[in-house]
Image (cartoon, rainbow, N blue to C red):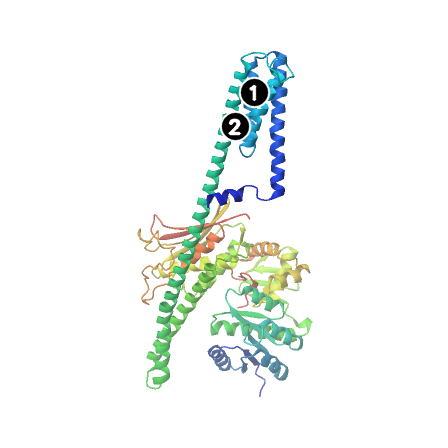
Amino acid sequence: MDNKPLILVVEDDKPIRNFICISLEAQGYRVMDTQYGKTAVTLVSSHNPDMIILDLGLPDMDGSGVIARIRPFTKAAIIVVSARGLEREKVEALDSGADDYLTKPFSVEELLARIRVAFRHLQYAGQPQNELLTLFKIDCLTIDLEKRRVFLSDEEIHLTPIEYKLMTLMAKYAGKVLTHKFILEEIWGTFSGNDTQSLRVFMANIRRKIEKDPAQPRYILTEVGVGYRFVDE
Amino acid sequence: MESSKTEHLSINNDTNHFRATIVNLALTIGIMIFVTILSLSFRYVGVAESNIIIAYILGVLLVARYTDGYVYGIAASVLGVLKFNFFFAEPYYTFEAYRPDYPITFVIMLISAIITSTLTTKAKQETKLQIVLAMERERLLEQQQESQLEVERERLRGNLLRAISHDLRTPLTGILGATATILDHGKVLDQGVQRNLLQGVYEDASWLIHSVENILSITRIDEGNIELKKNMEAVEEVVAEAVSRMKKQSAGHTIKINIPDELIMLPMDGILITQVLVNLIDNAIKYTADGSIIEIKTHIEGENAVFEVSDNGRGISEEALPLIFNRFYTGASLKDTGRRGTGLGLAICRSIITAHGGDISAFNNPAGGATFRFNLLAKE
């Protein structure tokens, strides 16, 4: 009867660890916790959790160090937690294998939303290729991956090939934050230094086509200093 | 002090000194040869002798002007008289002089040449001294400003500590009290009372987080090293991020966004400019009644991108207007939480915008309410 997902919480602050564990248990997840990075590495290899909530400021080990140690042998989704203003740290963690991040202070709601998204992607990843969804639909926006067409309500949206590639990439990872580096590598195959400017221009053009108000986007959210997130609910 | 400064300015090592001597000598000889050639050509075309004397005195003046010290000017004076004697006093090309008035001519010429040269040199040195004095004054002024800044920094640090100890202790006491009450008497307190206490804890904690973030930013700015990570950022993305972050707090307000259709990209530190917008929106929410409208506008004006956050509240009083960007200035909040701000939000905005090379200002709208406006250079 123990097929509930197992979540490992790595956080050195006891009250925060407590409230995360209590909220997760209330949602029916099984929870393990530790305050040390080294213990976390051991627990991951011995218990193989499905998800890891990892604070980046641990007393004994650098958060990115923990990711580097565990990523090679676990498929678990890793959600990192860090303070606002430490965007570089987050980008580093994401680029070295974390799946998503939460900015302190966060609410239980946000935490649970991120966990749901991460679990959904874990499930997709487990499915064979041909069973991947062919129709992506959210609110008024529909992406028909088979016919390679995009609709807003019933109206077809005309996208350039690169814009379409960007849309499908983000839809594939809907709900997850994608760093500039990741997107550039996936679309253009290279990441040329800090040249994220062209990416912004592409995103702005797509927004002009699918968003009613690009300054209050419904579909493509900007995570300033980190990347983009396509909404999923 | 002055003399040491002068010495410092003058040439202070041997090779330089030697080189300067050569240059001065060359100048003296060169100018005097030039004057002689000029005078020879004067004689050739038949210009009167008196003009040749004037030309030599001009030569002496030039030497005094462009060489260092009195020596070269005086040397040029003597040289001038000798040359006049040699080339232009009959008989030519000897140092003999037949005309009886020549000795008088020579003496007068020598005296006027020496006076000219010494006066010129003196004037030059006085100018130099004045420059040195001016530089000295400048340096002292800078030192004074530096120490004033240091005092100011100390004062701010003190104020910050006081703000932290007072403003943070209050909500912490609230949290401690409320949670202790629930822990100790949870069983006898009814649900409503407990909820009320927890609501207070929640509000205190939210306020603390906001304040701590502002205090962190201000200390970072205080240390004088706001590290700007400038990137080309899309204005719409930065505005969107700020608005989405404030959505929860702004439940009672309407936020309107009015930005141009075309994409505006600016060099800026996206995270810091987002923080400026968040602070301005937060401010507008705090000081206007529920139901008020907050509008965020941007447009391009010449070489600047202009951002405006305006509201239709009561506006800012005339006395407060010049003060609101000062640190620790707080207005009376409309909200009944009884809690003042830390008085850091707008000061941080100003520091960030100044670091970007822009301006920030506040004014009341003709139709009511207040507007905060800042501008950023549209190009690097």
Q: Position of residue A118 (x, y in %)?
A: 58, 73
Q: Is residue B2 visible?
A: yes
Say left or right for B302 vs B85: left
Q: Where, by quadrant of the figure, is residue B102 drawn?
A: top right
Q: Position of residue A61 (x, y in %)?
A: 58, 75
Q: Position of residue A150 (x, y in %)?
A: 60, 60
Which residue was labeled with disc 2? Answer: B117
Residue type pointed to by label 1: Ala
Categorize mark 1 by other alpha carbons within 10 Å: few (<14), some (14-19), many (20+): some
* Number of marks drawn: 2
Spatial CA distance of label 2 from label 1 is 14 Å
Q: Which mark is residue B55?
A: 1
Q: Position of residue B103 (x, y in %)?
A: 54, 16
Q: Is residue A9 above or below residue B167?
A: below
Say left or right for B199 vs B119: left
Residue type pointed to by label 2: Ser
- In this rendered view, identify the residue nearer to me: B128 or A51: B128
- In this rendered view, identify the residue nearer to me: B166 or B271: B166
- In this rendered view, identify the residue nearer to me: A231 or A180: A180
Categorize mark 2 by other alpha carbons within 10 Å: few (<14), some (14-19), many (20+): many
Q: Is residue B344 visible?
A: no
- In this rendered view, identify the residue nearer to me: B140 or B25: B25
Tell which circle, 2 or 1, labels the residue nearer the N-terminal end: 1
Q: Chain of mark 1?
A: B
